[in-house]
Image (cartoon, rainbow, N blue to C red):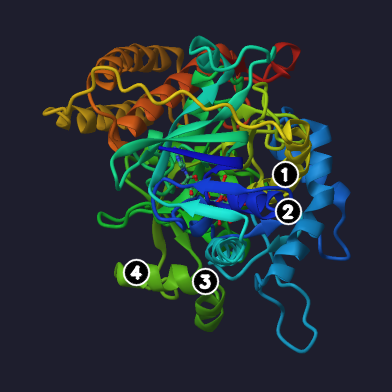
Amino acid sequence: MEVQTDFLVIGSGIAGLSFALEAAKFGSVAIVTKKEKTEGSTNYAQGGIASVFDPEDSFEEHIKDTLKSGDGLCREETVKMVIRDGPKRIRELMEMGVHFSHQAGPGGRLDLGREGGHSRRRIVHTKDLTGREVEHILLARAEENRNITIYENHMAIDLITRSKMLKQGIITRETEETCWGAYVLDAKENCVVTFAAHVTILATGGAGKVYLYTSNPDIATGDGVAIGYRAGVKVANMEFVQFHPTCLYHPVAKNFLISEAVRGEGGILLNGRGDRFMERYHPSKELATRDVVARSIDMELKKSGDECVYLDISHRPPEFIKDRFPHIYETCLNFGIDITTEPIPVVPAAHYMCGGLLTDLVGRTNLGNLYAIGEVACTGLHGANRLASNSLLEALVFARRAAHSSSKDLEKRKGEPLPGAPRWDSGNATDSEELVVVSHNWDEIRRFMWNYVGIVRTNKRLERARRRAEIIQGEIKEYYWNFTVTRDLLELRNIAQVAELIIECALLRKESRGLHYNLDYPRRDDRYWMRDTVVWL
Ligand code: FAD
Ligand code: SIN
């Protein structure tokens, strides 16, 4: 089966949907999304979107905070552009129907939250359910747009590139390596569909599931990075994995984040003895940047042997807590924790991938007609450590820029029919009776990544991880080529690829900077390392 479209968007989070809404002004858009359409990190975002709305605030200050958090690796041009475009993009969301919280009273201004690393209150939010509000409104607008079709339970496998088409004698004259769409697994019908497109957008989100403990939803298996890398796209800065300092520690709770906004509203961190330990690590205490807070918690836990630390907001009035953090309050209460009266047990967990597919200022990759936007991309905004709530902002700004840039790519090809793409070659695939091996490999990767490639690294641990990753890669190649593709198997192939990329980048960077902390090179080394780690096939 083949679907033809002007724009193929892979992913239905803030990046994919924002792109689709803008691109639909220029042509037809197909969005493929691997599970239910709302399922992605966007839907779970709590804190909000960082942007300059307070008349006392300035672009310069937001730029300064972002550069400081990025620890010398941000691309200044990107930072300036994203921060200056921010308020316009947020106003557009409001025009589409997104309701952000306002201060009480008639004509109340936007209620701005505070998070770590920000010198001021500048987080636009919908209490602690910002992502859900944004996702639902964007989806509603996309669903009423006649130029947009959404395909749920459709998982992109690999890109269709010029070299694949040349091999099959389908095209002969293009000189540049170009993308022409993707092969997509229709998980309901259990067949592979060819999506042929003039422009393809990877908006597949993050890769938290590469680690045993993560704040991310199940879809976050790094598919876009793996898919892009296999097609020859440059990948950068994968060593900078952001661990969120405060995820709920509870035997039953899975992936539940306790927003940094809780610390922004006065929450303090305590160790098992009840000491407020952050003052020993950094003058900004609980509101230091995330790399610092997560590492400090890690050190406290290693020193004490405890399983978790505690985040305490119970000194604020109960009415305030329930009103400002209704979702966190309710969820914790369901787990037997009343946050208005007792501290919340928390641990750090993998949260955000600062690295990804390398792009320019409009989201273009080095593969012709392929763009990457949102968490899958490495645009230069985050450098070595993302500033809190700068991610939704980045996705909004780049989605629009990519839509306008790629509309020009489409213009160039206008009138040309899409060449029929080669059909998916399933080789000698048969059904596997041993798919339990897939889940064993999944577990093994996530465990060794957590143990050896976590918050604190050493060369020895990284080498150990590399050896294990290589063995698993070998096994996956055997499985992948011998058995019919399934979503689990495809995801395993992707997390193994992403794990390998994180390990490679971590081994290449012989210093400590931002989120990458290696005990064998404990210092930042600006003489050699004020640069991205870039790898490609
Ligand atoms: P996502 O929203 O993750 O969407 C990815 C989409 O791609 C999904 O639809 C998924 O199904 C699809 N997909 C993936 N692989 C495939 C494939 N192979 N084929 C087809 N479809 C595929 N950032 C902030 O700025 N502020 C916050 O307050 C904030 N809070 C957060 C809270 C949590 C719990 C988490 C996990 C993250 C938070 N972040 C926050 C980070 C931010 O939410 C994400 O970086 C951002 O939402 C990413 O958007 P995206 O569109 O790139 O990806
Ligand atoms: C949070 O609410 O703590 C998450 C914010 C972010 O990841 O930017």
Q: Nearer the viewer, residue 413 or 430?
A: 413
Rounded to the nearest angstrom, the CA distance separating label 3 from label 4 is 14 Å
Q: Is residue 353 left or right of residue 365?
A: left
Rounded to the nearest angstrom, the CA distance separating label 1 from label 2 is 9 Å
Q: Is residue 460 above or below residue 180?
A: above
Residue 150 image point, x, y percent: 50, 53
- The residue at which mark 4 appears reads as 337
Q: Nearer the viewer, residue 295 or 303?
A: 295
Rounded to the nearest angstrom, the CA distance separating label 2 from label 4 is 48 Å
Q: Identity of the amino acid at label 1?
A: Ala
Residue appearing at x 43%, y 30% in the figure? 454
Q: Which mark is residue 25?
A: 2
Q: Identity of the amino acid at label 2?
A: Lys
Q: CB of mark 1 within 8 Å of CB of mark 2?
A: yes
- The residue at which mark 1 appears reads as 403
Q: Secondary structure at mark 4?
A: loop
Q: Which mark is residue 325?
A: 3
